[in-house]
Image: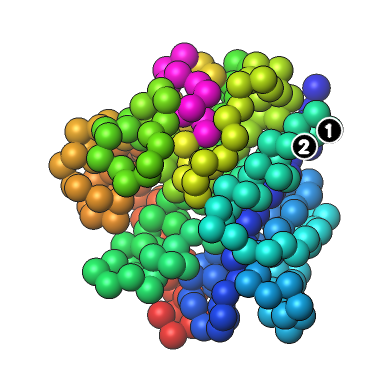
Amino acid sequence: MVHPKKLVFHFYAGEDWEKSPIYCLHKYFLTKYSGIFDSAEFYIAVNDLNDKATIESVEHFLIGCGFKDVRFFVQKNTWMCEAETLKQHVIDNLKHEDSHIFFAHSKGVMDYQKKGVEKDTLLTWITALYYLNLEYSKEAEWAFLNANAVFFGGLMELYNGNHTQAHAPKNDWLYCGGFYWINCPELLSRFGEEIPYPYDRFYGENLPGNLCKHYDYEAYSHNYMMIPSWEFDRVGSTYDSVYGRIKCLIEEEEMNKFNAEVESAKRYLETNTEW
């Protein structure tokens, strides 16, 4: 059975959102991979639902990405961030959804403003979130159709207990960054009665690891590779030694292609923003 592929994207638009080059980086990848999807849903989260200027500017910003069927929805931003979008518009709708959904969000917007985070490192990390999921989208399709997998994600990582979330994933692994594919019919069939209620903004990132054991063919990654916990222990935090962690997931030849994509995205930012 052929299942439609849908993008569900949580887009937070805060004050002066257009000034952040991170949004432009997301647009670069959304445009590059738009042809993968049969449809796209953008959930625009704003602080003021009456701020029509911001809402219209976001829609105008995204409309040219090239999606075949794109729809916009507006919602109040809450402390749950993208976790609320995942719960309300994916999990709560599973009984009516036969799609393979790729869930993503405007990752990096807040990180870009933090002290000590190098912008080129953040660029590499966001590139990995898209590239390791969408460059290998056919692997996700194979895993869903042939192995009945529930999830497929790029940055699959063993959990070492040093994360700052109040709730660790039950099965000690996660898709770091919270970008991943969801086989909606299989998720409903296997775990429809076990899906936990949201507890904090890391709910989405931890959800696959709360449901599936790793290495049991319920959750996949490219070439079934995973970042081992000792690599996280070695580098100490998400944005340190990004390349060391990505090298755990792809071979040398693939790494050359990934590096080329990072450089292409950087040139795009340098041309279109004050990167």
Near mark 1 (Cα within 10 A), the count class, few <14, some 14-19 or many ≥20, is: few
Badge 1 element: helix
130 displayed left or right of 255: right
Mark 1–mark 2 CB contact (< 8 Å): yes
Magenta stretch, residue numbers: 207-216
103 displayed left or right of 90: left
- Image quarter for residue 13? bottom right
Badge 2 element: helix
- Image quarter for residue 42? bottom right
- Label 2 belongs to which residue? 93
Residue 60 in percent (x, y) is at 74, 76
Q: Amino acid at mark 1?
A: His
Q: Which one is in front, 178 or 250?
A: 178
Q: Residue furthest left?
A: 234
- Label 1 belongs to which residue? 96
**Vertical arrangement, residue 66 with respect to residue 102, above or below:** below
Residue 179 in percent (x, y) is at 53, 45
Q: Which one is in front, 159 or 199?
A: 199
